[in-house]
Image: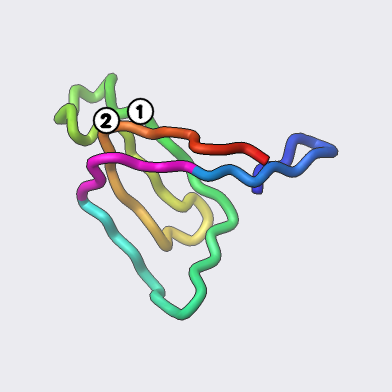
Amino acid sequence: MLKNYLQEFKVCIKFYNVSKFKLDEVSKVICISGFDIESMKERGWDRSQKYHVFDYENDTIEFFCESIEVVSVE
């Protein structure tokens, strides 16, 4: 869910060509309260690792991807 002051949104996102996937604290339910998407363009990284996606609160999930698609916003 994204919060825009008084509004909440449910966002479905697809990540393509995922690499270096890391998942910690595996349990039946994975709760991620927020994550960040960082562009790696300025660092000159490999094209397949264009974006760095990570959980900024608990460091539960982290990966790199080539592209990102917002599928839906409700």
Residue at 32% in and 32% down = 67
* Number of marks drawn: 2
Residue 31 spot, x, y in % from top left: 54, 65
Q: Which residue was labeled with disc 1? A: 39
In the rendered structure, does residue 36 fall within the stretch colored magenta? no
CB under 8 Å between callouts 1 and 2? Answer: yes
User: Residue at the left extreme?
Assistant: 46
Say left or right for 62 vs 5: left
Q: Which mark is residue 62?
A: none
The boundaries of the magenta stretch are: 13-19
Residue at 26% in and 33% down = 66
User: Residue at the right extreme?
Assistant: 6
Residue 42's image quarter? Answer: top left
Color scheme of the displayed model: rainbow
> What's under tag 1, amino acid-wise?
Ser
Q: Secondary structure at mark 2?
A: loop
Q: Which residue was labeled with disc 2? A: 50
Q: Is residue 8 above or below residue 68?
A: below
Residue 34 spot, x, y in % from top left: 56, 50
Residue 40 spot, x, y in % from top left: 29, 28
Q: Is residue 67 above or below residue 74?
A: above
Q: State which tag comes first along the sequence, 1 or 2.
A: 1
If the image is split into quadrants, where does the C terminus sit? top right
> What's under tag 2, amino acid-wise?
Lys
